[in-house]
Image: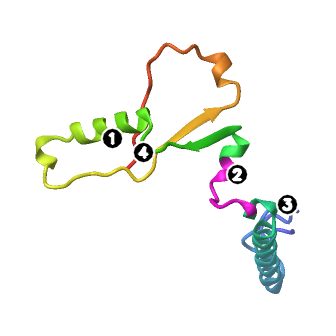
Amino acid sequence: LLCKESGRIHKGKVIHFVYPHLKHEIELLEVLDDIEIAFTTLNTDTNTYLNPIDPHYEQLKCKLYSVEKHEDIYILIDKYLQSTNASTHQQYKMDIEHVFKVERENNNKIFKDVGNKMLLWYR
């Protein structure tokens, strides 16, 4: 694109154009490009996932497993949740919606099992 002030050709967007209608045409092309990207995204195989976040975990080579209410780790997390409220927060009770276990490819080989666990809390 030709810049009006410098007379140079630029590859990116330029605010002032030699021909004002050219700016409008370029904006229309950019909108069409955005529409094409959105359409392509909607029509990819990633839509076979139930949750749109699943492909991101797949790219990280992570697997998510739902933890059932009867499992030991679920019971431990619930115990921590119920017993760590401050005295100023006794007017309500928190309940767990979901617990997930995350396994990343090759992490078992890298990290030694020493029995300690880190719990990630998200509310």
Q: Mark 4 points at which residue?
A: 69
Tag 4 near tag 1, CB within 8 Å: no
1 vs 2, front mark: 1
Q: Residue 55 carries which label?
A: 2
> Of the residues shown, which amino acid type is indicated by label 1?
Asp
The relative height of residue 35 versus residue 46 in the rendered view (above or below) is below
Residue at x-position 65% and y-position 32%:
104
The magenta-colored residue range is 48-56
The relative height of residue 38 versus residue 58 in the rendered view (above or below) is below
2 vs 3, front mark: 2
Q: Residue 29 carries which label?
A: none
Q: In this view, does 25 lie to the left or right of 50?
A: right
Q: Is residue 46 visible?
A: yes
Q: Which residue occupies the extreme left position in the image?
A: 87
Q: What element carries label 3?
A: loop
Residue at x-position 29% and y-position 41%:
81
2 vs 4, front mark: 4
Residue at x-position 71% and y-position 37%:
61
Q: Residue 47 location in percent, x, y?
A: 74, 64
> Of the residues shown, which amino acid type is indicated by label 4?
Lys
Q: Which colour scheme is used?
A: rainbow
> Of the residues shown, which amino acid type is indicated by label 2?
Pro
Which of marks 3 and 1 precedes in the sequence? Answer: 3
Which of marks 3 and 4 precedes in the sequence? Answer: 3
Measured in 3D between alpha carbons, the distance from the residue under mark 1 to the one under mark 3, in whole angstroms, is: 57 Å
Q: Name the residue under label 3.
A: 11
> Of the residues shown, which amino acid type is indicated by label 3?
Lys
Q: Name the residue under label 1.
A: 78
Tag 1 near tag 2, CB within 8 Å: no
Q: What element carries label 2?
A: helix
The relative height of residue 93 versus residue 68 in the rendered view (above or below) is below
